[in-house]
Image (cartoon, grey):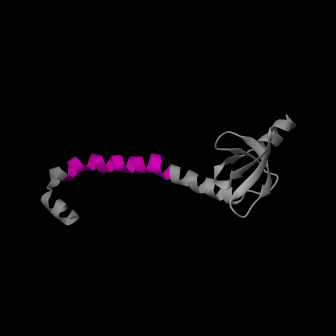
Amino acid sequence: MFQTILLQMNSEGIMSVLPFIAMVGVLYFFMIRPQVTRQKKEKKFQSEIKKGLKVVTTGGIHGRVVEINNDGTLLIETGAGKLRIERASISMELTAKYSADVKK
């Protein structure tokens, strides 16, 4: 299919397709690639969660990991009590941020 398209194009046809190819390249390097990198980092972080870590969920709940279960759930302790959540719903770690706030 691509051979047929390329054979039918002359030099003007290639020049008219070039901006579309450039737009796809820009979309890939500025939107898709950073998102994939971010997802890989988040997945790695979620697999390395350990007991005692202060975390924030994707819903904005702050807490400390109390228990890690083999079924992919965590028990986090918040100011209002303990919640059982999925490991995938952990957004980021706050342990370093809290320790920096305490030092101030």
- Indicate whether 32 appears above or below 62: below
Residue at x 83% of width, y 42% of height: 99
How far across and how far down the image is residue 34, in percent? 52, 49
- Please state which of residues 52 and 99 is positioned toward the viewer in this rendering: 52
Per the image, is 57 magenta? no
Q: Name the residue nearer the viewer: 68 or 49.
A: 68
Give how far across and how far down residue 35 sits, in percent: 52, 49
Q: Nearer the viewer, residue 17 or 61?
A: 61
Horizontal and vertical percent for residue 67? 80, 56
Q: Quadrant of residue 81?
A: top right
Compared with 46, 102 (above or below) is above
Q: In the rendered structure, which segment of residues is drawn in magenta?
A: 14-34
- Identify which residue is drawn at 71% across, 40% down: 61
Residue at 77% of width from left, 44% of height from top? 63
Q: Quadrant of the C terminus?
A: top right
Q: Is residue 26 left or right of residue 46?
A: left
Instruction: Report the side of 33 relative to 62 (left or right).
Output: left
